[in-house]
Image (tube, helix red, strand yellow):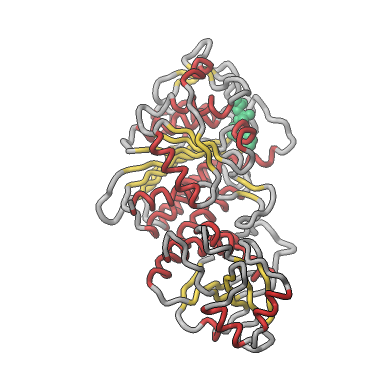
Amino acid sequence: MQVEIQSGNLVEQTVDALVLGVAPGRALDGDAAVVDERLLGALKQALEDNEFSGKVGSTLVIPTLGQIPAKRIVVTGTGDAQGRRAQDLTRAWGRAARAARESGARTVASAAPPTVADGLVASFRAATEGVVLALYRFLAYRTVDLPNKEVDAFAFVDARADAHTGIEIGNAIAQGTCVARDLGNMPPDILYPETLALRAQEIALANDLSCIIYDREALEKMGAAAIVAVGKGSERDPRLIHLTYKPRGESRGTIAFVGKGITFDTGGMSLKPGGGMEEMKFDMCGGGAVLGAMSALPALDLPYTVHGIVAGAENMPSGTAYRPGDILHTLNGKTIEIISTDAEGRLVLADALTYTSRLGVDAMIDLATLTGASVVALGDEGTSVFSSDDALADEILGAARWNAELMWHMPLWEEYKKQLKGSYADLRNSGGRPGGAIFAALFLQEFIEGTPWAHLDIAGPAWNTKETDLAPAGASGHGVRTLLTLLMNRAAG
Ligand code: BES
Ligand code: MN
Ligand code: ZN
């Protein structure tokens, strides 16, 4: 789905629905006033009769009864102008797009969103993201009861260049998020390390990125024995994926995104309980977010060199699986004693972070569905942010806030490091249950080789069990918008 821009007169559009924003107080100005006049005051009347609140999230569908070419009006609440944020427009236009779809509209034309303090570009960007994200569905594997209501075309009617710019940015960022959602939602029998790497190659080809794939032999040769060990129990060999984006003009610096790409996590020999195990197909959502973000870079024309690294493996129990008690030699030379084969994410990331740090990057940010403890700490919408660099953490939190992605800065307490010590090796891969997200982060920190680094534990928000305003149940693409916003902010500032 892609939002379009169109010039002309909103009220004359021959579409199934017109979207209008209305604030609390129900004052009608601009396009809304014109529409109301053509409807002989019926718009204002309907808002009053339905006690339309104008709050963000509220919508009202009104038939036009042939008074204008459009079949219906979808009114969406924009909240009070005072304190209105870009993220409010994302929600408001997401709700409007859903209300239009539910009403049966296939073609939609929208008035401009109100301009927020961040400016016109930001307003259109935010509203566009709302539309694309809210209309996303994953129907690839449905054969019956397919929904027959679908919005085929959504356009803002506006002639301004900044509107066009905002829509292009919004489309790119939201589509990148949808790439991550598609990958996350795919079943683990179809999406395994090899096919994940194939998808990455397709993304690279379509977006002019370079792509290197390391298969098991190449990983063994490299010395990435932790990735190899985690993949040993599966018939499906692991892969390390490395995409690179180079800007058209001069590069202002180099950043890397690193993702956990466990295509299915059974726990391995430290087998997980069966109930809910199907959700562990989402254990590659960090990797999905990295690939989704990489796919959006060319359209955003960002002036940075960006590496996208995904450590792909399937964690299975079998006669060839790695075991508790095994000692692994990682790429960076440290040895790890396996306590639980279910703490596999930190193992594949250990090698991936070392590999990335050796590329010589200014900063690296990893995303991983790493610990149940992060969900216990912050609930199922919050991301735990850890960083060796407070400025980087602040940058991430600022970008997350802009997008209403919930993230919180967590500690990397030196005092806890003693619990990482192995009895027979340098490190053990699991501490106790208390503070589990912190131990996982401290473990990763052992492999960053001095590179400024941040770790985002997205175990909670990587997928939704219920539909939200901006996503159906399933993979959320959480993190993509924050990563891209961070780069956009850097480029602007
Ligand atoms: N993929 C899981 C973490 C997870 C759990 C993500 C639930 C989302 C929802 C990870 O590989 C894992 O199993 N972690 C263990 C670590 C423990 C063995 C130290 C955990 O969190 O229990
Ligand atoms: Mn696990
Ligand atoms: Zn896992």
Residue at the outermost top position: 423
Q: Is residue 342 visible?
A: no
Look at the picture and state if 84 lies above or below 356: below
Where, by quadrant of the figure, is residue 320 drawn?
A: top right
How far from the left and from the top, in percent, is residue 21?
57, 70
Q: Relative to residue 244, is residue 79 drawn left or right?
A: right
Look at the picture and state if 139 lies above or below 96: above
Q: Relative to residue 457, is residue 487 drawn left or right?
A: left
Residue at image coords 43%, 24%: 446
Question: How many numbered markers are drawn?
Answer: 0
How far from the left and from the top, in percent, is residue 63?
69, 80
Query: For the N terminus, which image quadrant?
Result: bottom right
Residue at image coords 43%, 51%: 485
How far from the left and from the top, in percent, is residue 338?
56, 20
Q: Is residue 461 visible?
A: yes
How far from the left and from the top, in percent, is residue 194?
51, 43
- Ligand 1 sits in quadrant: top right
Look at the picture and state if 140 lies above or below 322: below
Residue at image coords 42%, 77%: 159
In the depicted view, which residue is nearer to us: 360 or 452?
452
